[in-house]
Image (tube, rainbow, N blue to C red):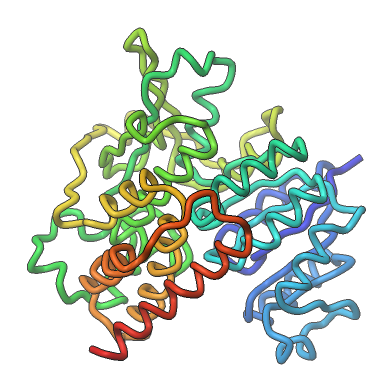
Amino acid sequence: MPQRIAILGSTGSIGRQTLDVLRALPDHFTVVALAAGRNVTLLNEQIREVNPALVAVSEAADASHVAHPNVLTGEVGLVEIVTRPDIDLVIVATSGKAGFVPTLAAIEARKQIAIANKEVLVMAGALVMEAVRKHGVELRPIDSEHSALWQCLRGEDSDAVAKLILTSSGGPFRTYSAEQLHDLSSAAALKHPTWVMGQKITIDSATLMNKGFEIIEAHWLFGKPYDQIDVIVHPQSIIHSMVQYVDGAIKAQLSAPDMRLAIQYALNYPARTAQLCNPLDLIAAHALTFEAPDTTRFPCLRLAREAGMAGGTYPTVLCAADEEAVDLYLAERIKFSDIPRLVEQALSAHTGVDNPPFEAILEVDNWARAYVQTQVAQG
């Protein structure tokens, strides 16, 4: 029988590309539920196409505009969707904190999960992975980098792994000086050189916070210490990540930069299905280059690694402070260079809590957001 799927964040970049993959594999999957933010127009188009049994929107005010008889709202609606008995696989394609509670609920309901939301593992990696082990759930990464690591590690002995190597395009400002990075428009920051993504992740890619999140995410997904996780800049975005083994051999996953490949792999795992994406033309790619990241010009990468190594609630602060700062930047209330400054101030002001329970994570998340808002209000 086809796998029954719920898509959280169906109108976002990953959600739309997930539907592209499902369109090409109609006999493999059926969409039971869709959940979206506030793009009701696109959600209604998706409803007409896939005819889900249930839909959800983030705001109750939008529910009356949704062309469906069964509309849920808010976090409660997401939890109701992911715990339905007629759903086998949950696609977590939301961004930010919005994915946290529904992901935990899906794990506790013993659903298989394909996750594109980095923040869930960053803000509460220990809690999430403990729940994954307890309930015997698969957590399948949709990130191109973590999908690449997942594929390179398949069939290998974990003890034979010397290093995980995450690749980064370097973002749109890779060659900019520190002075040039001070005051950049959000329009410029949203022009990623390789990928088409949502606003939050695109800004995080410009600051390299996204890559910092991926270090923490890789730590939890693959159980490797931080000193065995490296980042290198690879502007062509052809090699999506690599694994170095103890004998010196390196395995890399290469493909054209197309998120649908990672989505397709996560949906069909452990099988591979017929090619949906354009194949990589190595001759056209011509040259693959690499360089070290500059954590002086892009301090978010350093801050993320330090927060991950500090553990406890420090990654929660990192995640929440960054989300608030990015929102403020997109609203043109702060400058580009203020993003890492605000995150670092929040981390410095925080007193960490080891092994935080669920309630403590939410309290610290709220504290970090309020701290950033207060700092900006005070100039």
Q: Is residue 65 left or right of residue 51?
A: left
Q: Quadrant of residue 331?
A: bottom left
Image coordinates of residue 93 in percent, x first then y, are 61, 58
Taking the spot 49% from the left edge, 46% from the top edge, the residue there is 258
- Say which residue appears at 82% left-offset and 50% top-offset: 109
Task: Give the side of residue 288 with respect to residue 72, left or right.
Answer: left
Name the residue located 37 percent from the left edge and 37 percent from the top edge.
166
Q: Identify the residue at the far top of this view.
A: 247
Does 276 sit above or below residue 91?
above
- Indicate the quadrant containing the N terminus: top left, top right, bottom left or bottom right: top right
Please indicate whether residue 131 sits to the left or right of residue 259 in the image: right
The residue drawn where x is 17% and y is 76% is 183
Q: Position of residue 186 (x, y in %)?
A: 31, 76
One can see residue 230 in this view: yes
The image position of residue 103, as x and y in percent, is 68, 56
From this viewpoint, is residue 16 visible? no
Relative depth, front residue between 346 and 161: 346
Q: Is residue 367 left or right of residue 8?
A: left
